[in-house]
Image: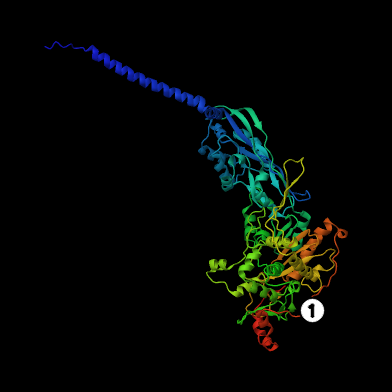
Amino acid sequence: MSDRPIKLERDEQHMFNVRAIVAGIIILFALLAILGRVYQLQVSQHEQYSELSRQHYEKRIPIPPNRGQIYDRNGVLLADSHTQYVLEVVRDNIGDENGDGRSTLADVDVFIARLGAIIPLQEKDIRLFKTQVRRFKYQPIPIRVNLTEEEIAVFAVNRPRFPGVSMEVRMERYYPLINTASHVIGYVGRIDARDLERVDKDEYIGTTHIGKSGVEASHEDRLHGQAGYHLIEVDAHGKKQSVISEQEPIGGQDLFLGLDINLQIQAEKLLGAERGAIVAMDPSNGEVLALASMPTFDPNLFIDGISQKDYTSLRDDPDRPLFNRALQGTYPPGSTIKPMVGVAGLAERVVTPGSRVYDPGFFRLSGQKHVFRCWNKRGHGSVDLKYAIQQSCDTYFYDLAYRMGIDRFSSFMSRFGFGEKTGIDLPSEAAGLMPSKEWKERRYKRSWFPGDTVNIGIGQGYWISTPLQLAHAVSIVANHGIRLKPHVLRGVRTTRNEEEKLLKPEPFAPIEVDQRFWNLAIQGMENVMRPGGTARAAGAGAAYRIAGKTGTAQVFGLSGGKYNAGRLAKRLRDHALFVGFAPVDNPKIAVAVIVENSSGSGGHTAAPIGRKLMDAYLLQQYGENMLKPAGVVGVSPEPEPEPVVSKTEKSTKKVTKKSQSKTKEKLKKVRGARD
C-alpha cells in the first residue's frame, strides 16, 4: 500500500481559497448591480417612477373649454353658443354593475345596448365613442349630446342602473342668422376619427365638436381654447375619492371678422334666386367686407349631425348650395380684366397712351382666314386704350395680346394674383388658371397657337379665375399697384372685458409701373360708368366717382347663328360679370360680381348689382355729403390723327366693304365676347 495521505489538506485549502475569492467577487458584483439599480430607481429615474406611482391613485380629468364667439366688424353676433345636456361615460366604472369593479370592451358593448334601450343612440355616436374609449379608460367620453327634456327625465329615473354615466351641461354652437354668410362662417360638427388624427387628443377629450368649414375650421386653433382639468385621487378600482387640484379651462378667443353683416345681407339679397357670387373688399387693408355665394344653406343642420334626408337634399341639389362660388368657383374672367391687360401692355411698351388700333368689328391674324369677332359687329373705328376700356373693344385687346405674346402676357398677369391662391384665411380656395405654353404642353400635349393668345387677350380661352381673384385684382388697380393679402379675420379678443386687437394687413410684392399707366386705366374704367360706357345705366346719378368694368363669359360656343339668351336653356347662357371700386379718389370698397347663366350682359345685370352694393356701403358708412361728387360726366374720346400702326393693323384696315360683306356669313359662325 502507498504511504501517501488520503487527505491533502494543502490542496483543499487552496481550492477553498479560490472558491471563496470567486464567490466574493460574484457577491461583490451582485451588490454593485443592486446598488446601481437602487441608484437608478431612487435617483436617476425618481421622477418617472414617482409619476407612474401617482398615476395609480391620481387621475387627470380634462375640462373642455368654451368655444370663442364670432362677430362681424360692428359687433353683430354671427356664431354663438348655448347650453346643452350631454351624457358622458367613464369606461372603467361601468363594470361595477356586475360587481367586479372593472370593465372590458365586451362590457362596453353590453352597456351600449342597455343604454340605447332607454336613450336613442346614433350609429355615428357609437362609433366615435368606441374609438375614444379604447384609449381612455378613466376619462369621461361623450356618448350622446343635446338631450331633450324628455330624455333628461328618462335618464334621471334610470340613473342608478348606469354607474359611470353622468349628465353634464356643455355649450353647443348656434348660428342666429341661419343661412346668412354661411360659406364664410362655416359650421362645427361632431368630432370623428379623422379629426382625432390631426388634433391633440388630450386637448379634445371631452370636446364634442370641431370646426368643419369656413372660419370655424380655418381658425379652429383660436376658437377652441385650452382644456382645463380636475386632478382627482382614486382607489385601486379607479373610483373617485377626492379632488386634489384643478385648473380652469381657458376659453377660445372671440373673433371679429371684416364682414359688414348688413352689406352681406344686401349682397345675398341682390343675387336673389340667381346662382352667383359677390366679393367686396376694402382696398386699403385687404379686409373682406362681404363674401356671398348663392344659393346658401343653414349651418345649424350640421351641428349635431345632419340627417340623411337633409344631406341628400343639399348634395343632390343641381344649384350646389354647399359650393362656395366666391372661393371655389372658376370662370373665364371675360372683359373685366381689360384694364389690367391695358396696364400690362403699357408697362411692356407694346402700346402707348396715345397709340390707336382700327376696329372694323373683328380681328384677323396675318395670313389666316379665321376671324375673331368684336362684340360690336360694326366695329368702333380708331380707338386708343382709354376708349377701348370704355367701350370694351375686343379688337384692341386681341391685337395687344397678340403683340405682347403669351410669355410676357402670362408673366405680367400673374403679378395680379391670377393663377394662384390669394392666401385668404378660408379653406378650400381654388387657384384658377393663368395659362402658358408650358401648361398647355403639359396638360394637352399640344403646342401653343397664336389664336390661343388672341382669346386670352379678352379673358376667354383657357384663362379661368375666381370671384375673389377678380376682387383682389381690381383692388390692386384701385391701389395703383399695392397688393394686400385678402383676409376675413379683422381682430381677436381673448377675454370679454378687453378691447378687440386688430390684425395688421399683410402686403405682397407691389406691381411697380409708371403711375400714369394706372391713371389711364382708371380713367377708362370711370368712363365705363358714364354716358357712352358699357355700364352707363348703372353709373347714372352716383354721388361719388366710380371706376368699373363689365364682362361676359361664354359657357359654350355657338356652332352658328346669333346668340340669343331667350332661346337658350338657362344653364347654357353666358355669365355676367362686373368689377369696380369707389370712390375713385379715395377707394373704400372694391367689388367683383358674377351672375351665372344670366339673361343679360355684364352691363345690364352684374353692374347694377355692383352699384347698389357700393351705395349700400358708402352711403351708410359716410353719407352722401361726405362723398366727393361724381364730377364731369359724358367724356368721349376726341378724334385724333391716325398714328403709324402695326402690320397687323394695316392688314386689318385693307379689308374693303366688299370683302366685309363676303365674310358676313362666316362671322355669324364665330362668336366673340359680349359686354
Which residue is most to the left? 1
* Residue 92 position in % (x across, y down): 55, 34
Instruction: State which quarter of the image contains the C terminus.
Output: bottom right
Image height of 266 relative to 140, above or below = below
User: In this rendering, would 206 be left or right of 619?
Assistant: left
Foreground pick, 250 / 109: 250
| Badge 1 amino acid | Pro
Toward which corner of the image does residue 232 lie, by quadrant?
Answer: top right
- What is the count of numbered marks? 1
Residue 330 appearing in the image? no
User: In this rendering, would 132 be left or right of 82?
Assistant: left
Foreground pick, 131 / 2: 2
Q: Residue at x 75, y 58 (%)?
A: 283
Instruction: State which quarter of the image contains the N terminus.
Output: top left
* Residue 101 position in % (x across, y down): 54, 30
* Residue 638 position in % (x across, y down): 80, 77
* Residue 147 position in % (x across, y down): 66, 42
Q: Which residue is under mark 1?
A: 639
User: In this rendering, would 248 be left or right of 42?
Assistant: right
Image height of 446 relative to 198, above or below = below
